[in-house]
Image (cartoon, helix red, strand yellow):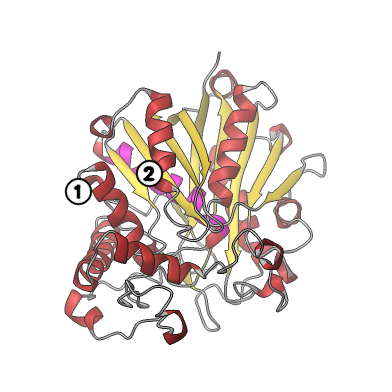
Amino acid sequence: MTNAVIVDAVRTASGKGKPGGALSEVHPVELLATTLRALLTRNDIDPATVDDVIAGCVSQSAEQSINVGRNALLAAGLPESVPGTTIDRQCGSSQQAAHFAAQGVLAGAYDAVIACGVESMSRVPMFSNTQGKDPYAPLTERYPDGLVPQGISAELIAARWKLTREELDIFAAQSHQRAAAAAEAGLFGTQIVPVGDHAVDETVRPTTTPDGLAGLRPSFADPGLAERFPEITWSITPGNASPLTDGASAVLIMNEDRAAALGLRPRARFHSFAVTGSDPLLMLTGIMPATEKILARSGLSIADLDAYEVNEAFAPVPLAWLREFDADPDRLNPNGGAIALGHPLGASGTKLLTTLVNHLESTGGRFGLQTMCEGGGMANALIIERL
């Protein structure tokens, strides 16, 4: 069976996901179209040879509605014969797009496919697609005490893994320091696609320190939940959580034989996949069973992995994962994570994959793990092997 390989991966620089952010004047369709055009131009391939475009997007309303993936490929100038679809697995949407794309190649359904994602959180605010309605109302019989927002889930994780506010702030500051160092060393240069004149991650704050973060007020403190969750100490702040972010990313995935026939050099191959559901109250802990599942399937151990990208939705998430697997902290998000580089929801999966491929190449590493916690209690996990 031929391999499903990554030929190339690109992303935009992050923009602050609020009015006035660097990408806030860019329509999300054009934001994604920019990455698609760049991906095809960089590799000099006929767009008509693309069998499908699979896009991740979470808030599929307003400018991101009516199949943003299809609209973006048309805006990018791809032939009308190229189809496109948009999927939602919450924060893991474009990671799931990469899974579907690679699995389609392995199944023989695709020879060349693009997995991608976009989220303009400045123009299509988070939860705007609920239109003030409660999407969880039909679940009250199963969960009579009610589900909670992700911020409360992050507080519960910090409490149950006994992670202090100081530990969270130290980790968050480290994310900014690592991202700033990577940018200074030019490690992001080849992966970032300029949008207009914006080509530097706007969300990275090089001067961030734990002492500076210590002064921030908790974001989710709710006296009404104190009796239900007495263990919570209210330690999640804007400083140790990922910021609202605009961005897009895209990965060109091919059958290894097709890549060779086109004279393209595969950069990595898809080694293993896993996806799992988890407790929708804790919500963000699915990365643990997903990691266990993919290690069992791959035959690899944590020690075999040269890097692990664990999405930094909130600082307690990767820190709890680190404790669960007794993993090497130096291999965890080595170039910073979403706390610094931003979390453009639907684009984050292929954005992390772009970062991971480039890191393995720059360090000579062989295996990399990527895992993403997802709203509603789910997680994807993926292992790639550098070629």
Q: Is residue 55 left or right of residue 191?
A: right
Residue type at mark 2 is Leu
The percent position of residue 285, horizontal first and vertical second, equals 42, 53
Residue type at mark 1 is Asp
User: SS of the residue at dot 2?
Assistant: helix
Give the residue pinned by disc 2: 356
Residue drawn at x 57%, y 72% is 121
Quick one: quadrant of the N terminus? top right
Residue drawn at x 53%, y 24% is 263
Residue 330 - label: 1
The percent position of residue 335, horizontal first and vertical second, equals 29, 54
- Magenta residues span 346-362
232 or 200: nearer the eye? Answer: 232
Q: Could you tell me what secondary structure mostly forms the magenta stretch?
A: helix
Q: Is 292 drawn above or below residue 375 in the view shown? A: above
Spot the residue most to the top.
Answer: 1
